[in-house]
Amino acid sequence: QEAAPRFDFCLPCWCAANTLTAKEFRLFPSVIWDVIRMSWDGYIDNLIAQTKDSSGTVHADKACIIGLDGGASWTTASHGSALKLQGTEGANIAKCFKNKDFAAFMSGGIHAEGTKYQFLRVEDEKLVLGKKKECGAITMQASKTAIVIAHTAEGCQQGNSNKGVAVIADYLESLGM
């Protein structure tokens, strides 16, 4: 039996070409929003590929994108390399980035997937780095509307993950996102 055709959908391209009024936004069928949300999963693959070094080693093993307003996940947890934030982790991360106040990370650590990472530093109020011995490291970078997050496996180089996160965050920023 022949499979149904697959239509790839690029949300940033669509957003750049279309404008929805508030009324049109509310009327957009929820099934379409599911397709749009799934399309963000391609950014996980792209980010991870960007962390590959000259020997072919991939340094980020998981990633996700969340909204700057409220921390809602833009990527799905069903992706094989999804970083699955739990409970209020996304909202807490988004709150720090939105307010440009990282004191909560400094005093209480960065929580992702139920793991508490030690805060290392913040750069330009948009890049945050954390680490936990034997668990790896976390890199987070904000664009205008999103936060791109990647996990670096223990023994891999966080600098390569930083590069992958920056590529995606800068791309979103270039689209006004």
Image: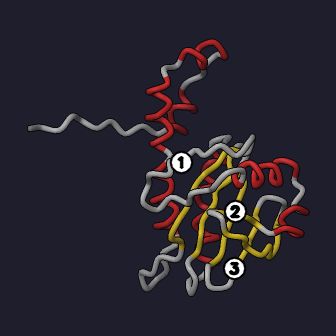
- Residue labelled with disc 1: 75
Is residue 93 rendered to the left or right of residue 152? right
Q: What element carries label 2?
A: strand
Q: Is mark 3 on a helix, strand or loop?
A: strand
Is residue 123 rendered to the left or right of residue 172? right
What distance separates the C-alpha of mark 2 from that of mark 3? 15 Å
Residue 58 drawn at (x, y percent): 47, 76
Vertical placement of 96 versus 55: above or below? above
Question: Quarter of the image holding residue 149?
Answer: bottom right
The nearer-to-camera label among 1 and 3 is: 3
Of pointers 1 and 3, the one earlier in the residue sequence: 1
Residue 129 drawn at (x, y percent): 74, 71
What distance separates the C-alpha of mark 1 from that of mark 3? 24 Å
Say what amino acid the circle numbered 3 marks: Lys
- Residue labelled with disc 3: 132
Residue 97 drawn at (x, y percent): 80, 53
Mark 2–mark 3 CB contact (< 8 Å): no
Say what amino acid the circle numbered 1 marks: Thr
- Residue labelled with disc 2: 140
